[in-house]
Image (cartoon, grey):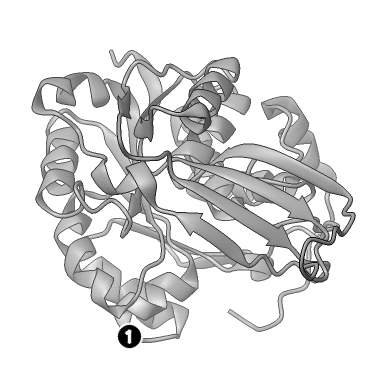
């Protein structure tokens, strides 16, 4: 039996967020804002934190620098109860970090240092420990220069040979990213991109055309996150369905996609059906959107299950 519920592998970044930013002061002047936070973020880091908040036994596998930012990320993840023995520290490369200026309308221009994400990889001798989890999540393809390609294929292929369930998300995908993603898809049980990134890679914009494209490439279950319009789900078997998002006061959408993935993983671990799991994942993302940063107002499994029952549903902007 696997030691962990989930092993979250890949991109981890320190986010420094401020809201609300309406302008950048000139010269050496100062502008007052409402809130500043530092959070664990990234398609592996934020997903790991949100899985831990939801009560999953979570391991994170990533690389950070030998610096204060790396210290913060490791300490913060340990405080959430995440197992961090496979977080590697590298000297001479800064921890990946982003400054996000959250505007009143939700826009969030960013200043980013790629840093340690570019040198992340998984050593052969660590592979079995990395995969000692019921769900193996890979997040960050597109920014993981040393890990993208053959190393990721090797890991996912080994995960499937061990009988693990695999989930996969990426970041900053464009048309060129499909060449890296396509060889991975036969080993992916749950492919969970945003519709924008998936459409860029597939070269089409219609959700049905997008999921057909990725099913043909080997992905079993295709789950497209639609932002304020919810989620479009194409199962390996059964009918395609759309679920609207919950209607909540949005503070910040940073990490909503990562938190949605955490909700999906929680449902997979608990054996829920795909429709209920997707609804729950929508509720996780809604809780995150109600606060600043990639964990937002996410509190616990019990609180999220309550939100699932009481939050109003938003009217989609289009018909799916």
Instruction: Tell me: 248 left or right of 49.
Output: right
Question: Residue 14 or 211: which is nearer the viewer?
Answer: 14
Q: Name which residue lies at 21% across and 38% down.
A: 121
- Check disc 1 and report the residue beneath it: 203
The quarter holding residue 304 reads: top right
Q: Residue at x 69, y 49 (%)?
A: 17
Q: Position of residue 240 (x, y in %)?
A: 46, 67
Query: Element at badge 1?
Result: loop
Report which quarter residue 200 is drawn in. Answer: bottom left
In the rendered image, the vertical position of residue 129 relative to residue 301, given as above or below: above
User: Which of these two is toward me, 242 or 194?
Assistant: 194
Vertical placement of residue 216 versus 65, above or below:
below
Q: Quick one: quadrant of the C terminus?
A: bottom right
Q: Residue furthest front?
A: 28
Q: Considering depth in this image, is 30 or 191 the residue closer to the camera?
A: 30
Residue 20 percent location from the top left of the image: 83, 60
| Left or right position of 29 against 245 | right
Against 277, is 4 above or below?
Answer: above
Tell me where residue 175 appears, x and y as whole percent: 30, 79
User: How packed is label 1: few (under 14 Cα within 10 Å), some, or many (20 or more)?
Assistant: some
Q: Quadrant of residue 12?
A: top left
Where in the figure is residue 290, as x and y percent of width and height?
A: 79, 49
Decide if residue 4 is in sight here: yes
Residue at 14 percent of width and 60 percent of height: 183
The quadrant the N terminus occupies is top left
The answer to whether residue 187 is above or below residue 240 is above
Q: Is residue 278 visible?
A: no
Q: Is residue 273 left or right of residue 309?
A: left
């Amino acid at each position: 039996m696997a030691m962990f519920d989930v092993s979250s592998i890949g991109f981890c970044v320190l986010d420094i967020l401020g809201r609300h930013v309406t302008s950048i002061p000139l010269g050496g002047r100062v502008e007052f804002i409402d809130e500043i936070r530092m959070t664990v973020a990234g398609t592996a880091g934020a997903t790991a934190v949100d899985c831990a908040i939801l009560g999953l036994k979570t391991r994170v596998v990533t690389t950070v620098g030998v610096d204060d930012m790396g210290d913060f990320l490791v300490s913060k993840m340990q405080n959430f109860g995440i197992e961090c023995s496979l977080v590697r520290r590298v000297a001479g490369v800064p921890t990946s970090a982003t400054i996000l200026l959250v505007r009143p309308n939700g826009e969030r221009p960013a200043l980013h240092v790629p840093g340690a994400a570019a040198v992340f990889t998984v050593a052969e001798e660590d592979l079995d420990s990395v995969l000692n989890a019921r769900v193996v999540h890979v997040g960050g393809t597109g920014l993981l220069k040393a890990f993208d390609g053959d190393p990721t294929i090797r890991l996912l292929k080994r995960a499937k040979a061990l009988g693990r369930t695999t989930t996969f998300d990426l970041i900053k995908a464009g048309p060129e990213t499909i060449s890296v993603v396509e060889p991975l898809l036969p080993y992916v049980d749950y492919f969970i991109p945003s519709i924008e990134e998936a459409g860029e890679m597939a070269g089409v914009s219609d959700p049905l055309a997008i999921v057909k494209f990725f099913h043909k490439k080997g992905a079993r279950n295709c789950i497209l996150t639609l932002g304020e319009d919810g989620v479009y789900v194409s199962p390996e078997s059964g009918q395609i369905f759309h679920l609207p998002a919950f209607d909540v006061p949005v503070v910040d959408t940073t990490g909503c996609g990562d938190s949605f993935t955490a909700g999906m993983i929680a449902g997979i671990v608990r054996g829920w059906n795909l429709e209920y799991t997707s609804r729950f994942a929508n509720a996780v993302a809604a809780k995150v959107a109600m606060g600043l940063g990639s964990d937002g107002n996410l509190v616990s499994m019990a609180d999220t299950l309550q939100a699932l029952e009481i939050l109003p549903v938003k009217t989609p902007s289009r018909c799916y």
